[in-house]
Amino acid sequence: MASKRQGKLIGRMLPAAVWLSATAAVVFLYLHRHQTFALTGLAVASSQTLSAADNGIVRVIPVSLFEPVQRGDLLAIVELGSPPENEYLKAVNEARKNTMLAELDRLKAELAAVEQQLRFDIAAENNSLMLRYGQLALDVENLYLDLLQIRTDLEMDRGLLAGLELEKNAVHDLLDKQAIHPYEARKAELEYEAMARKVTATEQLEAEAQNRLNAARRQLEQYALGQVDQSYIDALLGPHRKAVTVQENMLAELFAPTFRMMLTAKIDGVVSSILTSEGQGVQAGDIILTVSPPSADYILAWLDPAFQRPLEIHQPVEVAKHTFPRQVFQSEISSISPTVELMPEQLWPTPTMPKWGRAIKISIPEGIQLAGNELVGIRGL
């Protein structure tokens, strides 16, 4: 009878004992983990943020959220400015080019008048050597004006060609994604090829004009080495040369405005966020999308300002990766912040209680994959 009561008592106590044992094990594991991995670190990935350079409209976003991309892939096309503003800028730059060409024609006409004055003055002195030198000097100035005229057209066309090349490449990327009709790609390609032929032909003219100018300058230098007094010619051509310098400066500022900005990937990674949509207006600095690398670059952890133990560069630490596949790996401290700073909000004890700490940077060994913003445990400090 006593043994029967004892058996019933044991049967009643056994579940309680099992529950207490399980609770003790959980508490032990929690305390052990808390003690051994008391510091929480944050995996940091060097993402690429693409922003609008100026006010405009997002015309095309040929990628989707979480799509893998490679360095150089087209991510977005932004039309900068508004259509009326763009047409105005085109007209302004075309007017500037025409003004420069007209001014160069005027300078050529002035040179013709200078040549007549030169012939009249030198004829009175009957100095054939001086006359020949003056004619060579005028030839150099005329040839240089020819070269500036060619370069004025060439600089505008080069700017247009660069814009057409960007558009052609962007359209082909869209065609590969079946986002546009093949006709659009062929149209962009033909426009680019036509402008490329024009630029090539103009560059050939520029090279020929430069060769003629160099030959004339060499002849002029040979005469200058003789007994010719150059002061008269220099005084006669002085105002003209100053006017030419003004045109050179204007040519350096001449450009063909580009109204489309092609945003491309600078890193291999994944499109981690898209904050705008096609057809949406953006302002300068607005973030359009973000590309994140497939894995983090390093780990940051923040020590309490009251932390007393010494730290050293290359000090070994142990890092615990809590996500699948779980891993514990060895690493080391690569750098230590000299100041105390505000910790990321996800590491605050409560959302309304900011926390400060001294940051340490921990390298990630080769072969270890950590996602950006992944939390890890750290011990060994």
Image (cartoon, rainbow, N blue to C red):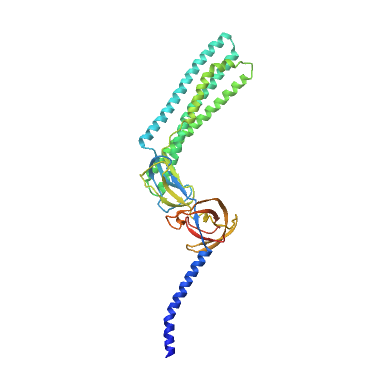
Q: Looking at the image, which is closer to me, 241 or 38?
A: 38
Give the residue furthest to the right.
226
In x, y percent, where is residue 179? 38, 48
In x, y percent, where is residue 213? 55, 25
Q: Quadrant of the N terminus?
A: bottom left
Residue at x-position 54% and y-position 28%: 210
Q: Quadrant of the C terminus?
A: bottom right
Q: Quadrant of residue 263?
A: top left
Residue at x-position 48% and y-position 34%: 200
Q: Quadrant of residue 122?
A: top right
Left or right: 186 with respect to 245? left
Residue at x-position 49% and y-position 17%: 112
Q: Looking at the image, which is closer to me, 40 or 259?
A: 40
Give the residue furthest to the front.
306
In x, y percent, where is residue 113? 49, 15
In x, y percent, where is residue 141? 53, 21
